[in-house]
């Protein structure tokens, strides 16, 4: 194994890891806000990719331009999902956890089924875009432009999210609601409004990820499944509810995946990710950056 | 119990009254189960397969002037013109669901034969259930060689398996070497279920037998979010020929990742699957000029056998696509099964099995480049000659074997 191979693998792993982080952060945000795991997270990603594809196919809008539109659409979608489904699921008096799991799980199955019915199960691709297929090569190391831009988008999104949560009134309201939803009602913050906006924001972030991924990944109704699993382990590894944890978790998952693929047969590369996760559970069950 | 004359008389009357009804019920309709993935990651395969089976059904049930079994006249003449009805079941690419659905087809839907399944891993369980209920099963499009070697009596495959396909690839390499092309090293890239594993094992064995060096043998997890690490290893190995055994999703990602990491092999010779799918060429066809895939079907045949073009047109009207390697085999699978049921003159499993064993359809009466359809004692048709096709200018042309070829191979690929 040459140094070049190692650097190339780690570079690819890092770029992919930043995207994993961007996909996972919406999940972490929603969980942190109200302790609900969105099992339809992969399907949110799927419809974001389809939205990007259709904007490209019908209106010839490049994924880079449609990314904000898709994020905005997903924002509305996320808020609606909260208002129509999750709001009622969290009211359950008995077996609240189960009701939440099955309501979002059911949503995932329905979304996948509707996608298959309306979009057909055929594999779609954004066949040409400004970035698609472009690659920069530095000293023999190849960095695909779509993933490079995706990584930059991820870093920017994390930066913006950090400022948003720490420097704005709404961010503070989000943080306060997460600390004590009962108390914020006393000071006049509408809990439902905050939760709906939180869901919207979480969905918008995965929408952004979907738009970027549509440039280089194939699109079909089940595409969310393989990414959702990685998003869950990313969030668990980084720490449930921690936005920064999702960022760090994504990078770790990407790098561990790349390293495992170098050392073991590539078909076992997921093993490395979960082995590291089990190790984290052993020494720090709440995740690397989880607060409790 | 005492049997009196009255009992006998009663019984006889009842039998006489029921007899014709039973006979009519048996012959008015022949029900065949078709089991495919209609949801999940490979649902599109099921959707396309359904169109192909419906095309075959049209040819069986209606009067057509083609030189194919059962084309002329309506229904199955051996069963008094009975019509064939298909019951579609969804196995979701899951062997356990395949098992349950096959059981349902046999016990609830009362099918007399089963055709399937796209994924070889599912064919394993489906054929086991069929064997238990003594219902004949035809692997229309499964290509894993281990399938027919399990000693099953009710398993049949009219199409070639991966060893025959891979042997054709190595025959082709040998022929190219004779012409002075340098082919010494190979890289295998295969997914981790029975299809990819069987395919790679066969290729490893053939490579060893014929003196080719396998410099990289990469097994990857199907539907991986990323294949960068895998492609990096292929690039480092830089073999003369890259031989992928991949389904559509991974095939698309493989080609995209290769382009991103600046890896351009001299030649790609693919084990079909994803590399015969329109979706893959729609997505990355511009990067695949000159890719070679094995196949059991070629539209070039329409020049010699005009009915191939006409039947393709019937299929295209339903599906919007040309016949490909998979849909053509599915079409033949149902036709071969219906032909056996017709000759069995019965919907009894054992009688259909005997008729399948006796099958001998000349190649000209198929839509394939095969010599004929005749099963060996394991249920495999060894006369199903595969072809190699090269993707040139947006379509596939037959380049091997010489008797079927209409063009010389372009080597290296662009």
Image (cartoon, coloured by chain):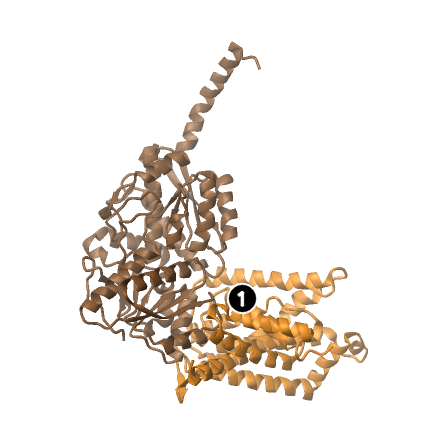
Chain colours: A orange, B brown
Q: Quadrant of residue A76?
A: bottom right
Q: Quadrant of the C terminus of chain B?
A: bottom left
Write down the chain letter for disc 1. A
Residue at left 41%, top 28%? B23
**Rendered view: A227 above or below B97:** below
Residue at left 18%, top 67%? B178
Q: How many residues crowd around disc 1 within 10 Å: few (fewer than 14), some, or many (20 or more)? A: many
Please provide percent x and percent y for residue B94.
Answer: 50, 55
Nearest the viewer among B127 and B113 is B127
Q: Quadrant of the N terminus of chain B?
A: top right
Q: Is residue B75 left or right of residue B67?
A: right
Residue under numbered circle 1: A225
For the question of whether residue A44 can be seen, the reply is no
Residue at left 38%, top 40%? B84
Q: Quadrant of residue B202?
A: bottom left
Please provide percent x and percent y for residue A275.
Answer: 59, 71
Please provide percent x and percent y for residue A23.
Answer: 56, 75
Q: Is residue B205 left or right of residue A121?
A: left
Nearest the viewer among B7 and B77 is B7
């Amino acid at each position: 194994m040459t140094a070049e191979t190692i650097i190339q693998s780690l570079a690819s792993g890092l770029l992919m890891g930043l995207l994993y982080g961007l996909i996972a952060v919406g999940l972490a945000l929603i969980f942190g806000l109200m302790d609900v795991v969105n099992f339809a997270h992969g399907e949110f990603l799927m419809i974001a990719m389809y939205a990007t594809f259709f904007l490209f196919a019908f209106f010839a809008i490049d994924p880079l331009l449609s990314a904000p539109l898709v994020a905005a659409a997903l924002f509305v979608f996320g808020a609606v999902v909260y208002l129509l489904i999750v709001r009622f699921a969290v009211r359950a008096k008995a077996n609240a956890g189960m009701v939440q799991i099955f309501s979002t799980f059911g949503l995932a199955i329905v979304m996948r089924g509707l996608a298959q019915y309306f979009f057909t199960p055929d594999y779609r691709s954004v066949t040409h875009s400004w970035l698609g297929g472009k690659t920069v090569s530095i000293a023999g190391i190849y960095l695909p432009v779509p993933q490079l831009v995706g990584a930059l988008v991820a870093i920017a999104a994390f930066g913006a999210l950090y400022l948003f949560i720490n420097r704005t009134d709404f961010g503070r309201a989000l943080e306060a609601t997460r600390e004590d939803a009962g108390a914020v009602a006393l000071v006049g913050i509408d809990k439902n409004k905050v939760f709906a906006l939180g869901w919207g924001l979480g969905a918008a972030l995965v929408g952004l990820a979907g738009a970027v991924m549509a440039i280089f990944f194939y699109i079909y109704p089940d595409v969310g499944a393989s990414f959702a699993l990685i998003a869950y382990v990313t969030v668990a590894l980084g720490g449930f509810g921690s936005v920064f944890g999702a960022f760090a978790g994504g990078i770790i998952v990407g790098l561990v995946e790349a390293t495992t693929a170098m050392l073991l047969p590539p078909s076992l590369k997921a093993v490395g990710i979960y082995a590291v996760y089990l190790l984290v559970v052993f020494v720090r069950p709440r995740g690397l950056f989880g607060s409790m | 119990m005492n049997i009196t004359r009255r009992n006998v008389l009663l019984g006889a009357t009842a039998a006489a009254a029921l007899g014709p009804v039973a006979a009519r019920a048996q012959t008015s309709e022949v029900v065949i189960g078709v089991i495919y993935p209609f949801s999940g990651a490979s649902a599109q395969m099921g959707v396309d397969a359904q169109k192909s089976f419906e095309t075959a059904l049209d040819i069986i049930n209606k009067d057509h002037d083609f030189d194919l079994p059962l084309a002329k006249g309506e229904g199955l003449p051996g069963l008094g013109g009975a019509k064939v009805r298909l019951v579609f079941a969804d196995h979701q690419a899951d062997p356990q669901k395949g098992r349950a659905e096959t059981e349902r087809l046999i016990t609830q839907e009362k099918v007399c034969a089963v055709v399937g399944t796209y994924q070889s891993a599912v064919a394993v369980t489906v054929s086991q259930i069929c064997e238990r209920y003594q219902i004949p099963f035809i692997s229309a499009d499964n290509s894993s060689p281990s399938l027919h070697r399990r000693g099953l009596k009710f398993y049949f495959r009219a199409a070639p398996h991966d060893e025959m396909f891979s042997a054709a690839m190595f025959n082709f390499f040998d022929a190219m070497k004779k012409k002075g092309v340098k082919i010494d090293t190979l890289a295998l890239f295969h997914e981790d279920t029975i299809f990819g594993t069987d395919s790679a094992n066969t290729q490893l064995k053939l490579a060893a037998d014929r003196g080719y060096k396998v410099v990289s043998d990469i097994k990857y997890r199907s539907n991986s979010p990323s294949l960068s690490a895998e492609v990096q290893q292929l690039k480092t190995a830089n073999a003369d020929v890259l031989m992928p055994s991949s389904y559509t999703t991974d095939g698309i990602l493989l080609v995209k990742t290769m382009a991103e990491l600046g890896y351009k092999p001299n030649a790609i010779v693919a084990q079909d699957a994803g590399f015969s799918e329109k979706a893959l060429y729609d997505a990355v066809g511009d990067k695949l000029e000159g890719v070679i895939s094995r196949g059991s079907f070629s539209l070039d045949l329409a020049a010699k056998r005009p009915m191939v073009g006409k039947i393709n047109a019937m299929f295209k009207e339903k599906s919007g696509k040309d016949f490909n390697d998979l849909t053509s085999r599915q079409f033949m699978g149902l036709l071969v099964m219906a032909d056996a049921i017709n000759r069995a003159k019965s919907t009894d499993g054992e009688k259909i099995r005997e008729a399948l064993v006796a099958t001998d359809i000349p190649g000209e009466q198929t839509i394939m480049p095969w010599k004929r359809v005749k099963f060996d004692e394991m249920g495999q048709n060894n006369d199903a000659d595969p072809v190699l096709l090269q993707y040139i200018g947006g379509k596939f042309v037959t380049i091997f074997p010489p008797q079927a070829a209409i063009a010389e191979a372009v080597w290296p690929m662009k």
